[in-house]
Image: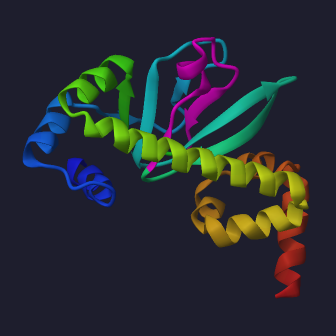
Amino acid sequence: MSQLLFDYLNQYMELTNEEQQFITALDLFQQFSKNDILLKEGQYTSSGYFVLKGCIRCYYLVDGEEKTTAFYTELESLEPSCVISKKPSPYYVACVEDSIILVSNDAIQKNSFEKFPRFESLCRIFSERQLAKNQSSFDHFKTSSPEERYLHLQNTRPDLTQRVPQYQLASYLGITPQSLSRLRSRIAGKG
């Protein structure tokens, strides 16, 4: 798993052997099972997550109903809002599939930045990219119909339609599972 991480990081910054050994020694990789909850509403964490294998999602519980807001798959990271706000999490983070996740925290990051200052620049780049991606996703969601959202998802993240249960996918698209079934049938009929 370390090599997968290094290959990804090397796209942005060539890591030295010393940096790779340091990261490996941190032993940050954790395995989680499908349906494991990494973070519950009302809890606080200082941990950030980087998915090496698998899929995790964020969701709110609204009147007993799950409202999915995001999915994170291979080579995507999530830093829950409570890490920054220092307030309890307003949402859940759970595994959709068996997953291998790099779990880091403030203390590890601080130590890493002190030892290798250029890691801080790398984290800034990742944060900026994630912010831009989130803004684009939010804008698209707010300005498109459910059918346009689904077609966009098929074009940009086709793996999700196969990996994620239909009720979670429907929630993410802002529709009911029944509406998603009808939408899929209508789209298939057009093809």
Taking depth in this image into account, of 123 and 79 the one nearest to the observer is: 123
Q: Quadrant of residue 115?
A: top left
Q: Where in the figure is residue 113, as x and y percent of width and height? A: 28, 28
* Left/right of residue 169 with respect to residue 131 in the rendered view: right
* Left/right of residue 84 with respect to residue 138 in the rendered view: left
8 to 32, vertically: above or below: below
Residue lying at the far bottom of the rendered structure: 191
Q: Quadrant of the C terminus?
A: bottom right
Residue 95 falls inside the magenta stretch: yes
What residue do we see at 70% from left, 64% from top? Answer: 153
Is residue 158 at all visible to an observer of this figure?
Answer: yes
Residue 81 falls inside the magenta stretch: yes
What residue do we see at 85% from left, 62% from top? Answer: 181
Q: Where in the figure is residue 111, as x and y percent of width and height? A: 25, 21
**Magenta span of residues:** 76-96
Q: Quadrant of residue 43?
A: top right
* Left/right of residue 118 with respect to residue 22 in the rendered view: right
9 to 186, vertically: above or below: above
Q: How many marks can you see?
A: 0
Q: Where in the figure is residue 87, as x and y percent of width and height? A: 63, 11
